[in-house]
Image: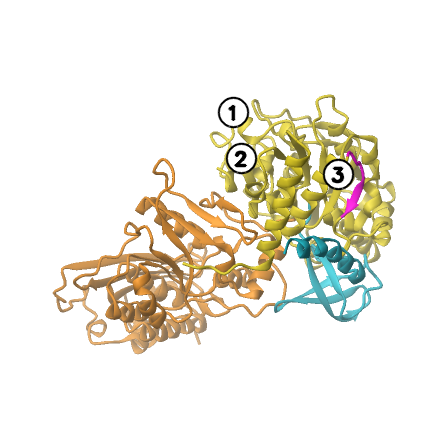
Chain colours: A cyan, B yellow, C orange
Amino acid sequence: MCLAIPLKVIDIPSEGMAQVETDGVTIEVSSILTPDIKKGEYVLVHAGFIIEKLATKEANSRLELFKEIYERKN
Amino acid sequence: MNFSKKSMKEKIKVIKNLISTEIQKQNISNINLMEVCGTHTMAIAKYAIKSMLPTNINIISGPGCPVCVTAATDIEMGIELASRSETIIATFGDMIKVPGRKKTLSEFGNVKIIYSPLDALALAQNTPNKEIVLLGIGFETTTPLIAATMLQAQKSALNNFSVLSMNKTVPAALEVILSSSDCKINGLLLPGHVSAVTGRNYFDFLSKFNAAGVISGFGPLEIMESIYLLVKMFSERKKEVINNHPQFVTEEGNQTAMKILFSVFEDADVDWRGIGIIPHSGLAIRKEFAQYDAKKKFKLHTTRIENPPHCLCGNILMGKARPNDCKLFGKACTPANPIGPCMVSSEGTCAAYYKYYL
Amino acid sequence: MNNSINLTHGSGGTQMHQFIKERIMAKLGNNILEKMDDAAVMENQKSSQIAMTTDSFVVNPLFFPGGDIGRLAICGTVNDLATSGAVAHALSLAFILEDGILFSDLDKIIDSIATTAKEARIKIVTGDTKVVERGKCDKIFINTTGLGFINEGISISSHKAQPQDCVYITGTMGNHEVALMKARELFDFSITTQSDVAPLNVAVNKLLSLTKNIHTIKDPTRGGVASALREICEHSQCTIKIFEEHLPVDKDVHAVCDLLGLDPLYLANEGKFIIIAPESSHSQIMQAFPQSSIIGEVIKTLTNNKDELLLETISGGMRKIRMLDTMQLPRIC
């Protein structure tokens, strides 16, 4: 029930804040809920806060699960 | 005219065929799936997902639209505050058209639309002679943000900021729906962003009921894949909660966010518009934060407001009725003149139906 | 030294005449306007059809990324004239000024009007200025009325879309409204999006010199492309199908829409046209409007002679598009 989109962390200007960016839009957001984020990571932003970061390994495993289905059908 | 195909469309076709094949192979006459979350209601409508599914899959909208389920009583409290010249109401945009007893917040000049709860905090810092009240709506995704904002207010010793809390939680409402004797729900499409905060295991309570769950993101391919997984589990009689959004959803979720949430809020019985009071379904501000609790600060009263006659929003939110079952839908009740909450919010079931399906 | 407008500037006396001469005439002057007669007298262009349109501009803020109220006032009206296929010939320009509006702001606006009128190759032939008390108008309201002449053989209207016509948009959608939202501080994301406000009449003149076989030209202003197409469906009694994957939206506009829960199909544009024409006019359209793309087609009405606007989604589904009943609000969900 929540509009959130993935953005990339491009800077950490101070504790508790992060600068995130996508497609030419830059926003300053709070990282209070995700204090261990790092520059270069992809994160989920909702209403001015980072709520989670992208788990690349898991993202790939999900793609693998269905990859077999798509390749099989081709 | 030859428009080139993209690979996502082709993948969706594969899933579409898999779903149809499974339904036929297993002789499934009817399957009822509830999509819980307002963002899913919008995405399913926007991408015309239903137009790609066999007609014996019924997608029913659930109560996960925080604007829709905000009680008229709560809006009236917001209106009472908006009527005071010393206050500024800070709210997310889609709240301003929700009707109270008669009025909406859009009729008041001191209502400011904000993108983030932090904007409300900044407003309080920049207008020290005004009382800023943030309307606290949202589920488990949004409430940690409001909690964090209140902690920030406390740290800055702000005394002109408070929150009118109308925050709610998902599980209790789902339990009410699933334990109802006439419940026909076979599977649930679970909210990807709520789950990112709460973790997959937050929805394990569903094993008590006869329904499987799939946590899904909001892109059209992922939604179709999740529907396929639900159909598969139905035909295999499995009742698991599968995480189909592992890129952002972990087993335990964002523990920092959940800790912050429960440091400021506690479990409460709250009023859901069209449904009534559901025990343990909401979040109230803890007494240690009373100075930021607008209800206590301004000594607000709640008076029960009856639902408008003929309005079926309660049943629609519970998944027991569809918008076109309602006498008022599309006639007396339209986005321009909404009577019930499902039409007011742009991601409400009736608003989505009206905009995309009529 | 006085740095703002006051009521005396609207009272008809020497101060007013001096103000008009120095601040308006000096920048917009031409042989007709300079006569300062109560009515502008022009040569009859001997065309069988005349087009006329009027619009008032009350935008807030007055200055925004990519433009201002002055530029908008010229573009809005010359573009409206162009949608009928008329060659824009002359404009009237009327100001209502609030006592206290700064000369520096007014000068900037008039400069912008002058530049845009030159770009649109149009003369302002008559005008009016009123000054009202503080609080009686929001700094400046502008009205422009335009007159144009339609050449032989041209018949362009929202009532003329035909089955098998292609539907074009002459550039990306939503830039103007996003730039305005930023200027109004409705969000504080950093963006470089500019309003697309621009006069399109010269390009339409070029198009019609290459081919007269154009059926509809419409400017998707308030309510966006969706509302404009819905109107065409109703007027032409047809069904139009558009393809989501072909809708041109700049990446930053797309990102803002995703963040706020807005639909670019409903966002205002001030420098784009929808053009509906047979496939045979394709190369001429691309010559006159090189940034154009085909977004859909006019198809026969499907059932019950009902006009519909259909969208094939990026996922391959099909749904209808309605007129917006209320303004879009940023969503939380």
Badge nearest the viewer, 2 or 1? 1
The span picked out in magenta is B237-243
Badge nearest the viewer, 3 or 1? 3
Query: Which three-letter amino acid code belongs to the residue tagged 2?
Result: Pro
Marks 3 and 1 share the same chain: yes
Query: Which three-letter amino acid code belongs to the residue tagged 3?
Result: Met
Describe the element under mark 3 as helix, strand or loop.
Answer: helix
Cα separation, mark 2 vs mark 1, equals 13 Å
Marks 2 and 1 share the same chain: yes
Q: Please name the residue that numbered disc 3 is placed on.
A: B233
Residue at horizontal 87 percent and vertical 44 percent from the top: B288
Q: Which of B235/C151 is in front? A: B235
Q: Identify the subunit bearing mark 1.
A: B
Q: Which sits earlier in the primary sequence, circle 2 or circle 1? A: 1
Q: Quadrant of the C terminus of chain A?
A: bottom right
- The question of residue B240 being in magenta is answered with yes
Task: Examine the image and state in which quarter residue B311 appears.
Answer: top right
- The question of residue C155 being in magenta is answered with no
Q: Which sits earlier in the primary sequence, circle 3 or circle 1? A: 3
